[in-house]
Image (spheres, rainbow, N blue to C red):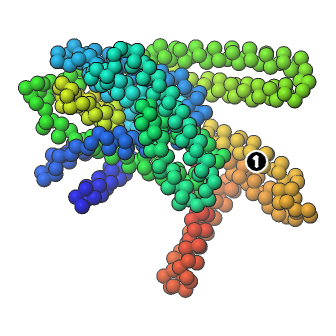
Amino acid sequence: MELALFAVIGVAVIVTVAAFSKRLGIAAPLILVVVGLGLSYVPGLPTFTVPHELILMGVLPPLLYAAAVNVPVVDFRRNLGAISSLSVFLVLFSAFATGLLLYILLPDLDLAAAIALGAVVSPPDAVAATSIGKKLGLPPRLVTVLEGEGLVNDATALVLLRSAIAFSAGGMSSIWDGVADFGFAVVAAVVVGLLVGFTTVYIRSKLHDPVLDTAISFVVPFLAFIPAEELGASGVLAVVVAGLYTGHRAGAAFSAQARINDSVNWHTVQFLLENGVFLLMGLEIRYLVENIDPELLTVRESVMIGLGVTALLIAIRFIWMGPLIMLLRAKVGYQERRTNRFRATLDRFKAQGLADERSRRRHSRGEDLYRRRQADIKQLRSEGLDWRGGVVIGWSGMRGVVTLAAAQSLPESTPYREQLVLIAFTVAVVTLLLQGGTLPWLIRMLGVRGRNAAEDQRDLATLLDEISDAGLRVLENPAVCLDLDADVDPDVVERVRQSTFLRSELAWERVKALGIGTSATPQLQYRELRRAVVDAEREALLTARREGRFPSRTLADAQRLLDLEESRLKPRLGEH
């Protein structure tokens, strides 16, 4: 009963803080840490400590899955170089550098245990950074890099943590055992994630009951995490791979209702788990401070070491960004030269003649690959990372969920264990409050801006024109679509054609409205009037329900129809 009460209070605090954070212009995670710290000292409130297994196995898989299904695979692939550099190599370098510092400062701590703590504090949590970035309109590429880094770096850190703990306990004889373990953990996790993703997507595509589909979607993260961990692989990476695959295949395999349900459900799960962890982080600080043995290392000394580790991590991340930005720019040029050579090869192949079906298929696949490479280059050039983007990424190194859970997973026999956990929490809290609190100011000062609304709307209108053209070609022979021998009524065909035209026309009118700030265009007026009609219909429905003149099942059916219409007519980009 007490646990249920605390859960209800926690959700109420999270929702309240999230609502007020939008008005204050401060990311909710930052406020929740401070609120949690303040609540921990309320008289009569018990001290909080959450088992690390609950975070690592109960919270982290659904949290990462919820983030992964919403990351476009195309953007992830285009930025794989930057994401890999930050989430793998930077995490490894930071862990070893931090471990070396702790090894020097704490004489009773062996190097492997020091590196274990380095692995704990190395992976940034992208939650606060991306929420701030999206609110302030960061370029999409910056947000993608931060989101991708947040997905993969947890796996890197946790595998390194496991290897370092095993090495410290004598479970590994050489560093090459650790390298082999790391390689196996990554490869096996990718295989497990793909298998789980493929299997669950196939099963869900055959289901037509949204309740069953939702039930399966909730267990996918654990279906990927548990087998991978049992095999000795990275369960976290398996979850990310399964999420990326599911998100990529959703458009083709799932129904529209399943995609809508997934979006709402997983955004809700992500909201509650992310913010709940930050609230717990604040609540646990009191418990950590009270359990420090001052004879080994005082609270003040532990916090000072945490501040030193924080400074080192910030410095390493900024130093890392300089060469990375230069390499990414050089890589775009290399990709362009390679694509031009590929174009020349395709032209020579075509000039030699496409004599048989096999050669024509090969040439067609080559053309598809060329167009994809061209699109990649165009996108990377239009959203290139400059020094200002590098500064933003460099300052977006806030620690969070994994640092909270992994710190408490250190073995009880580890020297300075309580102090090490406090050091890790110091790093997490300081980076959240310092970097997260000043990131909006930094973004504004640097003048970093994403694409404006008019450009996004113009792209949408252009895309709608393309897909509308493809859709209208179907109407050239409508009888085939309906599997009819007789002709289809021309009025029916014309109604379908006009509804398709209206969608594109509305999109272009929004472009016009956004570009010159004119009054509402005819299609926007139509939507506004239609919304007013639906509002009046809803009032009539509520009146009928109060009077009890219709069966409840009939009222529920009418409610669903109005809900569907209202959601279709809700204000979009450029409307008020």
Residue extending farthest left: 295
Instruction: Measuring from the top left, give residue 536's x and y in whole percent.
Output: 57, 72
Taking the spot 23% from the left edge, 24% from the top edge, the residue there is 307
Instruction: Measuring from the top left, give residue 336's x and y in whole percent.
Output: 67, 17
Instruction: Measuring from the top left, give residue 517's x and y in whole percent.
Output: 61, 46
Residue type (three-letter) at the residue carrying disc 1: Ser
Question: Is 307 situated left or right of 178 in this image?
Answer: left
Q: Nearer the viewer, residue 433 or 160?
A: 160
> In this rendering, does residue 406 appear at all?
yes
Instruction: Measuring from the top left, give residue 457's x and y in whole percent.
Output: 63, 42
Taking the spot 27% from the left edge, 42% from the top edge, the residue there is 51
Name the image quarter holding residue 91: top left
Q: Secondary structure at mark 1?
A: helix
In the image, residue 194 above or below residue 506: above
Question: Is 40 situated left or right of 264 in this image?
Answer: left
> In this rendering, does residue 143 appear at all?
no
In the image, residue 520 above or below residue 347: below
Taking the spot 76% from the left edge, 52% from the top edge, the residue there is 501
| Crowding at mark 1 (Cα within 10 Å: few <14, some 14-19, many 20+) | some
Taking the spot 12% from the left edge, 37% from the top edge, the residue there is 290
Name the image quarter holding residue 404: top left
Q: Which residue is mark 1?
A: 468
